[in-house]
Image (cartoon, helix red, strand yellow):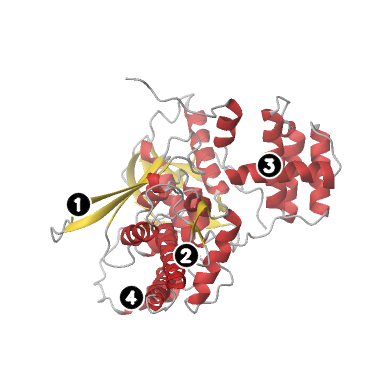
Amino acid sequence: MERSRREDVSVEALKEAGLRQNTLRAADGAVRHFEQTFGGLLPASPTAMADYIAFSLEEGLAVSTVGQRVSLLGTWHEEMGYPNPNQGSLVKTVLKGARSRYRKAPKKAVPLSRDHLVRIVQACDDAIIAAAQFDDPKQSLAQTRSAGRDKAFFLLGFWCAFRSDELVNLRWEYLTFGEGRDAKTGRTIRTLEVFLPASKGDRSAEGRSWALHEMSELCPVTALFDLQAEMMADEGPVFVKIGRWGHAGERPLHINSVLELMKRAIARAGLDAAGFSTHSLRRGFANHAIDRNTDVRDLMDWVKWKDIRSAVAYLEANQRLANTLAEIDQDMPPKVSVLKPERLLSDGQSNPIVAVPFSDRVLILNARIEKNNGAVPDSAVQLIRQDIERGVLAKLKLVKKDGAEYHFMSPMDLDSAEFADWAEELIHEIVETVDEAGCWCEPELWRKADHQEYGREWVGPSIGWASGGRD
C-alpha cells in the first residue's frame, strides 16, 4: 500500500506546532520587553536577569507577570543553546523576595454558574427563533448561525471545562458523533467524542478525549449537532467568525475576540458582564461539580488536572458555610447522646485524643491545616487533606483517624537508624503539599507511650512554619 506524502514538513514547522500559540506570543512579548523596554542584551547573565526583575517591579508590573516573563526568557536561552540564567540561586532568591514583598491576592474570573448558563442558552434560543421571522434570508442566516455558534461555545466550554484556546482550536475533524442507549430509559440517544490533539496540560501532545452523550437540557451534543447542520461543515474550525450576511469564515476565531464574544452573549442574556473572563467557563464547571459533591479525583480526571493545587485554585470560597450548615442542622432530628471513651489532653493542645491500644509501633501524626490568607478558598483545606490522605498517608497502615490526627503503624522499628530519615521525609512531603497550595501546616509526630503523663511521647521532627513564618 503506497503512503501519501505530506507537504511542507520541516523541523521549524513541527517545532512551532509543539508550542501553544499563547506561549509563542508571550515569549515574543517577553523578549521585546527585555530588549526594548529594559534595554538588556540577550543572552543575559544571572545579574542582568536579577536587574530586569527589579526594573519590572519598579515599572509597576505584577509579580506574576514578572515571574512568567523570567521563565519564558529562561526557556528562550535553552532553545537557543545558551545556559539558562534562572538556574542559579541569584534569580531564584530575587524572585522569592519579589513574591514575598509585592505579591497580591490574584484576581480571579467570576465563575459562570449553571444558572448563568441557563439564561445565556435561552437568549441564544430566542435569537434563533426570532431570526426565523426575518424577511431578509441573509440576515436570518447570520443571526441563526451566530446564535447557534455562541450556544455551542458556552455549552461545550462549560461541560468540558475547556480553556478559550482549546475551543478556538477545535475542528470538526476532532468531533465524532454517534448513537447509544440511555441507561435508564433504553431510548436511542446521540453521543459525542471530543478529541484535542494538544492542550496546555498535555505536555507531550499525546491528545485527550472527552465522551459526552445527549442531555435532557443544556446539551452540548445537540448544540454541536445543530451547529454542524447549520454550517454545513464536516471539516475546518468549529468556531468561526460569522459575516454580516451569514458567511462563515474559514479561519478560527481569533483568541483576542473570545472575551468580546462571551461578554456580548452574557449581556444579551440580561446579565452584568463585568468580572467574567475567558476562564469563567472552566471555573464555573469546577465549582458546579464541587457544589454537587463530586469527588475531587473524578473532577481532576475530567478536567485533566494532575495536581490537587490546580483544583484548589479554581474553587470559590464558601462565604456562608456556617449558615448553610446551620440550615441543614435545623432539618435534622436530634441524636441521642452516648457515653464517650475517656479522652486525654496533650500539653498545650485543645483537641482531645482518644486513647488507642498500646503498641511499640503506633505513631500519632498531628497535621492541622489552615489557610495562609483570605485569598485561599475555604474548600482548599478539605481538598488538600484529601490529597494527603490519598497520597502520602495511603501507604501507611491507619489504625484510626480523629480530626486532624492520624494513628498508624510505623513501617519500621521506632528505634532503628532508618526511622529518623523516614519520619523527616514524611513530614517534608506533607509540608510541601500544603505550602504549595497556599496553606499552612506544622506537622508533629508522636509515639504511643503509656508511661508518659499524657500517653504520648514526641519523636519529631517538627518542621516549623511551612510558609516561611506566620505573624
Q: Position of residue 1 (x, y in %)?
A: 32, 20
Q: Residues within 10 Å of mark 2 (few under 14, many from 20)?
A: some
Residue tagged 3: 27
Q: Position of residue 87 (x, y in %)?
A: 70, 31
Distance of mark 4 from mark 1, alpha carbons? 42 Å
Q: Earlier in the sequence, mark 3 or mark 4?
A: 3
Q: Position of residue 271 (x, y in %)?
A: 51, 77
Between label 2 and label 4, give the one nearer the viewer.
2
Three-letter residue code for mark 4: Asp
Between label 3 and label 4, give the one nearer the viewer.
3
| Residue in front for this viewpoint, 188 or 183 | 188
Residue tagged 1: 180
The residue at 59%/72% (across/down) is 274
Secondary structure under tag 1 reads strand
Three-letter residue code for mark 3: Ala
Q: Which mark is residue 329?
A: 4
Q: Position of residue 230 (x, y in %)?
A: 37, 61
Against 104, residue 10 (above or below) is: above
Residue tagged 2: 246
Distance of mark 3 from mark 1, alpha carbons? 45 Å
| Residue in front for this viewpoint, 434 or 152 | 152
Between label 3 and label 1, give the one nearer the viewer.
1
Q: Residues within 10 Å of mark 3 (few under 14, many from 20)?
A: many
Q: Which mark is residue 380?
A: none
Secondary structure under tag 2 reads loop
Between label 2 and label 3, give the one nearer the viewer.
2
Three-letter residue code for mark 2: Gly
Three-letter residue code for mark 1: Gly
Secondary structure under tag 4 reads helix
